[in-house]
Amino acid sequence: MTSETSRTAVSRRGQTVVPAAIRRRHRIKEGDTLIWVDDGRTIKVLPLPEDAVTTLRGSGKGEHLLKRLLEERARDQNR
């Protein structure tokens, strides 16, 4: 997988632009929906196809989500 860095500004209204090269590579067109995933350290922007489950599959990789879920459940039980 190729990594690309682009820089865009955020407008006063909170808007930004998806760089043209990224739009072409991911076939993002006018009217498409993007999902913003904030894990507290990084922000990921994912195009939302008609099958949203496919887009999100694997997006939590490396986040140790099962471990975090089990720890949270244990804390809830101790309350």
Image: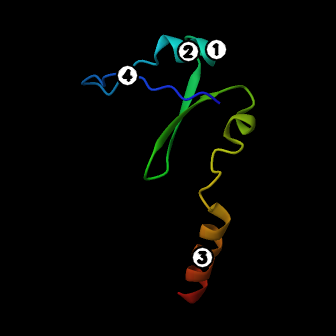
* Between discs 4 and 1, the one toward the N terminus: 4
Inter-mark Cα distance, 1 to 3: 39 Å
Q: Position of residue 35 (x, y in %)?
A: 55, 34
Label 4 close to label 1 by CB (< 8 Å): no
Q: Position of residue 78 (x, y in %)?
A: 56, 88
Q: Amino acid at mark 2?
A: Arg
Q: Residue furthest bottom?
A: 78
* Between discs 1 and 3, the one toward the N terminus: 1
Number of marks drawn = 4
At x 35%, y 21%, the residue is: 8
**Left or right, residue 23 beside residue 41:** right
In the picture, residue 26 is in which quadrant? top right
Mark number, residue 23: 2
* Between discs 2 and 3, the one toward the N terminus: 2
Q: Mark 1 highlights which residue?
A: 27
Q: Mark 4 highlights which residue?
A: 16
Label 1 close to label 2 by CB (< 8 Å): yes
Numbered disc 2: secondary structure: helix
Q: Nearer the viewer, residue 27 or 79?
A: 27
Q: Amino acid at mark 4?
A: Thr
At x 59%, y 57%, the residue is: 63
Mark number, residue 71: 3
